[in-house]
Image: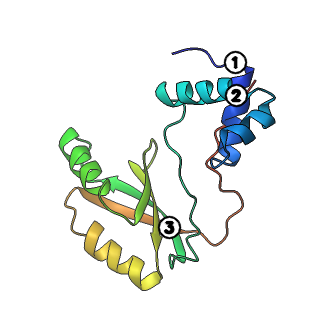
Amino acid sequence: MEILDKIDILILRELQKDAKLTTKELAAKVNLSPSPVFERQKRLEREGYIKKYVAVVDPIKTGNGIMVLCNVRLKHHSKEFSRQFTSVIADIDEVVECFNTSGDYDYQLKIYARNMQAYQEFVLGTLGDMDCIGSLHSIFVIGEVKNTLSVPLKA
């Protein structure tokens, strides 16, 4: 894996702003011709700097009006419980992010639900059926101050 130079960083910054840029548009933004920009972008993909290209969907417009940060404490700190939890969570659509954390809780989930009733059903049903969970602490997001997928890049 090569070290990123200033041009690579510029390309990544621009793609983080708008992944739909054509090679020609991207080349104009970084002051290079399209061919080397295309090659650099392909290298950045190949080397794993660019994991994937996504569309950022508005959760409210798609009927997911509630965002919840759910802190999870497992019953026991064991490989078995951790594997059981992560394998189930990975397949649950409502859970859009899952982090293994330090501190009072073992995991933090970011969950979208249609409404409070849907979240309650999710907690009592889906999460409640998981024997490895000891306790949950739900934090309901009442407003969004900043939400970005961009990674800070220093030139």
The residue drawn where x is 59% and y is 30% is 41
Q: Residues within 10 Å of mark 2 (few under 14, many from 20)?
A: some
Q: Residue at x 56, y 65 (%)?
A: 57
Estimate the x, y position of residue 126 in percent, counting from the top left.
Answer: 27, 70
Disc 1 versus disc 3: nearer the observer: 1
> What is the x, y in percent for residue 19?
63, 47
Residue 74 versus residue 33 in the image, above or below = below
**Residue annotated with mark 2:** 9
Amino acid type shown at disc 1: Asp
Q: CA distance from mark 1 to mark 3?
A: 39 Å
Q: State the separation of the CA atoms marked 1 and 2.
A: 6 Å
> In the figure, residue 34 lies in which quadrant?
top right
Q: Judge by depth and name the residue closer to the eye, 102 or 96.
A: 96
Which numbered disc, 1 or 3, marks the residue that appears first in the sequence?
A: 1
The answer to whether residue 152 shows anywhere in this view is no
Residue underneath mark 1: 5
